[in-house]
Image (cartoon, helix red, strand yellow):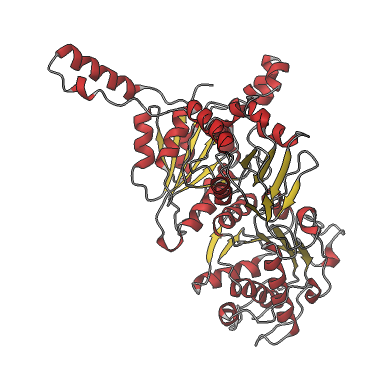
Amino acid sequence: MQAPATDAASALLAGLVSRGVRHLVVSPGSRSQALALVAAALEHAGLVRLHVRIDERVAGFTALGIARETGMPAAVICTSGTAVANLLPAALEAHHSGVPLLLLTADRPPELRGVGANQTTRQPGLFHPATRFDADLPVPEAVDPDATAPQTDTFDAVAATALAAALGEGALAAGPVHLNVPLREPLAGAVPAWLVERATRAAPADDVTDSEASGALYQGGGGIGVVGVAPEQAALVLEPGPRTIVVAGADAGPAAEDLAHRGGFPLVAEIVSGARFGRHVVHSYRALLREPDLGGRVQRVVVFGHPTLSREVARLLGRDDVEVIAVRGPGEPVNLNRATRTVDAVRVDGDTDRAWLGDWMRASRAAAVDLSPPAPDAEGLSSAVPQERLGAINAEVEVMRAPVDRAALVDALWRATWPHDRLVFGSSRLVRVADDLLGGKKVAVHSNRGLAGIDGTIATATGVALASQDDERPGVTRVLLGDLTLLHDVGALLLPPGEREPRLQVVVGNDGGGTIFDGLEVASVAGAAAMERVQFTPQNVRLEHLALAYGWEYRRVSTRVALDQALTAPSGGRQLIEVPLDR
């Protein structure tokens, strides 16, 4: 039996796959069964990687992680009702961080909206403020046995429009797209014979990128996506003169380091920037920005990415006496002083201010922190004098038994990670410790700093791991987070049997609650009981039992030696590594 719903789903998904979408994330449901079954058929044909998640919030962030790693959106498929609302956190993060995302939500037909029908709410426009494009698609009415019906071309055209919008065409940045797919019964039928042929054909030369071709659609956009196409600009030339630094926030990427290198500028690079490497990286930048002779003398800042980890950078970018130039990238342009100039590209012209750079580099070297464990006393260990040898042995034993603190934890993780690996930071106290202490190293770093929430951290890391390890590529994905961030996304630990396991290490610094609040203003105004109850929110979850229940390998480590071994031991699957920390 054939069904209009399945034929329309086939045209839509084949249109996406033929244009390069390679990952589909499905949350099961009745109304979405046609889309889900077509996704399964595409997986069976070897055309896509299919990921099944029972929690739509986990599904959304898994897709977000895949897109972060690949630059191409994954399509998320879900049923109607609250299932759709659970995609909102991932949609907002994608919007604010400029990550492409395709949301395909099944729905009841329009005549059942607003009349008390089961599992029905007004889904069109639900993500409207965040989307680059959204559409309430026409209800499929006809079976199309040979892919010649107008309905098939309509859904194919929608696929073209949606993908282009998700990748940022006609907008200032990539972001989420919402396609609401209303369907009438029968909700599924036989997958059409033409599915694979259409999914593997080359996209039409006159591919549609105008939403008018999609028929009578609900169209929208918001935030970044509504201001239109960015005008073509020549690169802004940075004339010599003003004392300049480069600031690299989340997702800045190597371009920030390249400008600092070419221009001879100090580089303030957040740990989540992907730009913390090279000779001009400033160590302990928070303290140096507070110095009147350094931070106080800055006249011009070139910003890449989205800085979020320090108040010192925020204050600098908000100063009226500092010229701020923001280089347009993914996510929202930075404009904290309301006088920021946003440009597409910059280049340098003129000589380096060697004295200015030298002042920063000398201060940076003096402020650098060496977190390495002390080297063994080789002379003492080989001494023929018993007391000398015993003293050296005792010193080694003390090093081996030393408990792990936050500084040692972030240092061990940083040292264990190499260019073929991936590192994901959760929004917790630990990312700030890492930002404050770690030196330069060129590794691939991800984080959800668009809204800097703790939502979906494990799911995002899973998506990053799955995408980065496609085609048997080497490397391990490590995610560093706090205990509350882990518990907030604990459902992401569930992976279905039969799917390829990612090489993924979830490293949890467990201090029993939200110690990040101990360093915020609330700690000075809240009473001890209230602080404990509603801010610190203590927990005593047995993480080893969680790991066992979800099928993860579990290790609890409390010394640096054990931590180094856990991070670098060969791993073929999922590991949960718990590191107990003092409050």
Residue 323, x across and y down, in percent: 73, 40
Residue 46, x across and y down, in percent: 49, 72
Q: For the point 66% across and 82% down, which residue is it?
A: 205
Location of residue 26 by image quarter: bottom right
Does residue 510 lie above or below 175 as drawn?
above
Q: Nearer the viewer, residue 25 or 327?
A: 327
Q: Nearer the viewer, residue 69 or 90?
A: 69
Where's the N terminus, which quadrant? bottom right
User: Which residue in the rendered view is the most extreme toward the front?
Assistant: 351
Give the left or right position of residue 178, taking residue 460 as reference.
right
Does residue 185 lie above or below 312 as drawn?
below
Q: Can residue 199 be seen in this snapshot?
A: yes
Q: Nearer the viewer, residue 479 or 196?
A: 479
Q: Nearer the viewer, residue 152 or 454?
A: 454
Location of residue 233 by image quarter: bottom right
User: Which residue in the rendered view is the most extreme toward the top?
Assistant: 387
Does residue 94 lie above or below 190 as drawn?
above
Residue 441, x across and y down, in percent: 46, 42
Location of residue 108 by image quarter: bottom right
Q: Can residue 492 be seen in this snapshot?
A: no
Residue 380, x across and y down, in percent: 20, 19
Where's the C terminus, which quadrant? top right
